[in-house]
Amino acid sequence: MAKITKAVIPAAGLGTRFLPATKAVPKEMIPIVDRPTIQYIIEEAAQAGITDLLIITSRTKKAIEDHFDKSYELETELEKSGKTALLEEMKQIRSMMNIQYVRQAEPKGLGHAIYCAKSFVGNEPFAVLLGDDVVYSQKPCLLQMIEKFEEYQASILGVQSVAQSEVSKYGIVSGEQVSDRMWRVHDMVEKPKQEEAPTNVAVLGRYIIMPEIFEHLEKTKPGAGGEIQLTDALKTLAKEQEMYAYDFVGRRYDVGNKMGFLEATVEYALRREDLSEDFIKYLKQLVNR
Ligand code: G1P
């Protein structure tokens, strides 16, 4: 039975929704509390059993590679000064999995970015995690999806319902329910107008995809926003083989959006044992002012 050990994180986007912060700093490096957002995503992948990761980057994303590399000076300094816990944390960050990088030379869309992973992926099903979608859940979102993959042996899209007013931001799926939280996908549309959306079930940044997707990506013409869309290639793949949508359990934050980022910052801080007590006190004082 095919096992999912490879994942791809597209991280070549310009981050225009978060300017000016993202002018010189990759949006994936903006921290929630004290870790870059991409670290949360990679931790989720590691907890789901991913061992090999490809990050699709671009010219301005060097900081991502530095973050997951060994910093000699820092580790030597931490060792000398006896800061063992911090040293261990730094080592842990760089040893979560094998990470490779490839650059997407031009911003031609998510579908094109995934196509850059073709030779890394080879002929295996693989996971895709989008950096703007951070998910908090007891059982990591990707692990939930891998368990479903083991059962269904087909592409699985991670979905949740969104407000009708939000459908035009997402890939929207339609299909028939086959079991608890699972739908067989019949059709998909990227960023439909509110009045044209078939449902309000949105793909939220987690995918398990069969390798045949690359044949479809090759033929996919630019779609919504003039970009080569992953959704369009998935739509044609779904006509050819079974594809499922799984309504994952968890709180998902759109950290590429200012409001979503603020919600994530507050809620992750509240979950931190070392911060929550003081932070709650502060928030209470603030609202009672
Ligand atoms: C991308 C995908 C879209 C998906 C969304 C999830 O859009 O194209 O299908 O629903 O991520 O966050 P983006 O947010 O990159 O515009």
Image: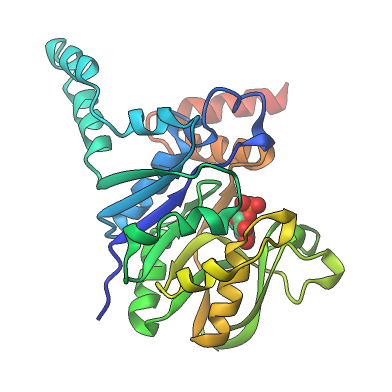
- Residue at 54%, 31% (x, y): give it: 280
How many numbered marks does the figure carry? 0
- Residue at 57%, 55% (x, y): give it: 110
Q: Is residue 145 left or right of residue 221?
A: left
The residue at the far right in this view is 195
Q: Position of residue 154 (x, y in %)?
A: 42, 80
Residue 137 location, quadrant = bottom left
Q: Position of residue 94 (x, y in %)?
A: 25, 36
Figure quadrant of the N terminus: bottom left
Q: Is residue 8 left or right of residue 238?
A: left
Front one among 283 and 204: 204
Q: Is residue 101 left or right of residue 236?
A: left
Front one among 195 and 233: 233
Quadrant where ligand 1 appears = bottom right
Front one among 285 and 24: 24
Q: Position of residue 217 (x, y in %)?
A: 53, 67
Up the image or down, 160 lies above or below 187; here it is above
Up the image or down, 274 lies above or below 37; here it is above
Up the image or down, 190 lies above or below 103; here it is below
Q: Is residue 32 visible?
A: no
Q: Is residue 282 visible?
A: yes
Q: Position of residue 87 (x, y in %)?
A: 20, 24
- Residue at 32%, 71% (x, y): give it: 123
Figure quadrant of the C terminus: top right
Residue 149 location, quadrant = bottom left
- Residue at 21%, 40% (x, y): give it: 95
Up the image or down, 86 lies above or below 184; here it is above
Front one among 123 and 254: 123
Type of colouring: rainbow
